[in-house]
Image: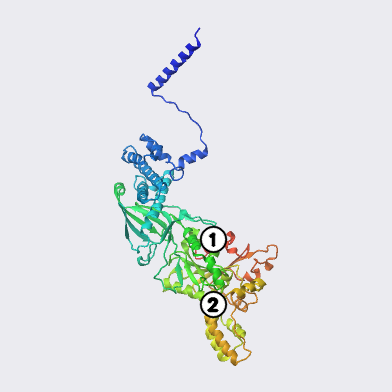
Amino acid sequence: MISREGIHSCLARAAWWIALLAVLSGCGGITVSSIERREYVAGMRGDVLTAGRLSMPTAESLRALGLDASSCDLDGARCREAIESSSLLGDERKLSALAELWLQRALRLTRAGPDQVHLDAIRNAYLETARYAYAYLFFTDRRPRQRAFEDRQIQVLDYYNFAVKDAIGLIFPRYRGRPPVSPALLAEGRWRIHLTLEDGRPSGQRRLPKELVAASSLRFDGLRNVYRRDGFGAEMVAVLEPDASSEPAQPFSRMEVPTITAIIRFRGNTLDEVLRTHDIDLIAFDPYRYETVELGGVDVPLAANFTAGYALWLARFDFSRKALRGVLGRTGGVAAPHVYLMQPYDPDRHVLITLHGLASSPLAWLNVANEILGDEELRRRFQVWQVVYPTNAPIAFNHRNIRTVIEDTLEHFDPTGTAPASGEIVVVGHSMGGVLSRLMVSSSGDRLKPAFIEDTGLEGEPLDRVLAEFGPYLAFEPMPQVSRAVFIAAPHRGTPFADRRLSRWAANLVLLPYDILDTLTDLNRSLAAIGADQPGTPTLRVPNSIENLSDRSLFLRVADTMPISANVQYHSIIANNTPNRPLEDSNDGVVPFRSAHLPGAASEKVIESWHSVQETPAAILELRRILRTHCPPR
């Protein structure tokens, strides 16, 4: 009988012999298990940007060379040298791995601290990342379209875009404030950077920004959507210094926070030249003008963020405060109409003009303009001009002055008036802006003068003097450049809201702008002198904007009889905040349906909403529908 100890000894010897045979035979063991869907996606898509670790393709390349991916955290240079010197890896595997390994180094240095030594090394690491990614994308045997469905190409494109964004963010502060020179040569260690601005402006009008902001670093509260275009390049916002060369009385301003897309191109016509060069082109594009860019003999889509610049401009300009101060006649408010161009002027895009309402500002069009700029078809066909004006001024004054600044802006950019931008203009107005829009496409004839004369009680030479002052505000014809108008919640026949106690109290707080006060002061002096000679002559008092909007307003009653130009198609978008009432008796809380409705409209859309209907999704969809019918593309 074998003892227990003997059995254990036999088993131990058997196990030893089995292990020895396995080693001698070169056989290995493997087990197979299932992975969850989440693990599969994380394994396929995870990399240094998304997961904080090297991607599966780079890890595989390292293992093929006998290296462990985790060791690259400690000795990244060794890993990069091993990949670069290897003849066992194809160009695609080698270049994509080097791009990720250089990005890993840049991110590690960024976490280490911002001292100057690190900043130089970080800049270099980001530029090397961009170099290897650029080489992978455009200088390997396969073209980008042949890898269109590969995750790896998307990852490497992300490495490039991210590296360009952060490299520019580190390079730019060293050159802030330098005079604009195009092309400019910047020195960054061993790199020579040739700067070019492709924004569609003549070289003399190009300015280096005072600040560059990565669009990806911004969060947009208050916007329903952020509109981007996927593609090649870093999405940035350039904050420009005010143009000191502009005339102080210039009627327009370019939005000084334009969106740009930046790319870095490494000079060379072969893979070897690209990998050895230290001459690079840093090019900033206007993504409204450029949809593609040619790189390595390939047309690639240019990335863009169409929301970032507009949102940053609105946030920094503080229009809400300016609008309120303007209504109350305080300094720092809006004193005169002004046109803001949402993108560089384009002679081939039709102009869309927006007019806000009482005590409002371009913030009233926050989502409207963003949705239009986000609509690819509309973005190609329209440029948005937002008019800001003093909403405390009488409607007649604002109407004439708004016309003037629009016409002056058109003449500045298109003196001959022959560009597509100078014709087929669309005007969109909300509330009081809708009333102003209607006046822009209407003919006054002699309708306003009799009412004005009746109001003054004057005749003869005194009347002639008064009409000399006010005549230009009382007679006008439709603007010939405008061919379509959209009236949104517009009180064409006034509103009883303007006669309520609260509104009358608010009207007493409204102060007129100084330039209008000067006109009225001179006029009132004349009337006072007339009154001294003619007892009982009333003193002329021009109503302010709130009083102008009353349903008892003589001005609006007369304006309602003015014919709209036969060359203009007009549309109404009307809000209804009282859905339980018959439509004819409904209102939006401020404007009755009877006042907003206009016979003869090409379309009329009633939307359940409060007065600020222009910001609702339904109103924006209707406006987009209308704009798509305007001058459809051939």
Tell me which residue sits at (55%, 88%) in the image: 464
Q: Which residue is mark 1?
A: 367
Q: How many marks on residues?
A: 2
Residue positioned most to the front? 115
In the rendered view, would you say 297 is above or below 513? above
Q: Say what secondary structure mark 2 lies in.
A: helix
Colouring: rainbow
| Mark 1 surroundings within 10 Å by alpha-carbon count, few (fewer than 14), some (14 through 19), many (20 or more) | many
Tell me which residue sits at (55%, 91%) in the image: 461
Residue positioned most to the top? 1
In the rendered view, would you say 123 is above or below 543? above
Does residue 401 appear to the left or right of 550 in the view shown?
left
Pointers 1 and 2 in contact (C-beta within 8 Å): no
Residue 363: where, in percent of width, then height? Answer: 54, 64
In the rendered view, would you say 27 is above or below 364? above
**Marker disc for residue 397:** 2
Q: Say what secondary structure mark 1 lies in.
A: helix
Residue 556: where, in percent of width, then height? Answer: 61, 76
Q: CA distance from mark 1 to mark 2?
A: 29 Å
Residue 539: where, in percent of width, then height? Answer: 60, 85
Image quarter of residue 185: bottom left
Tell me which residue sits at (62%, 91%) in the image: 535
Residue 449: where, in percent of width, then height? Answer: 58, 83
Residue positioned most to the right? 581
- Identified by mark 2, the residue type is Phe
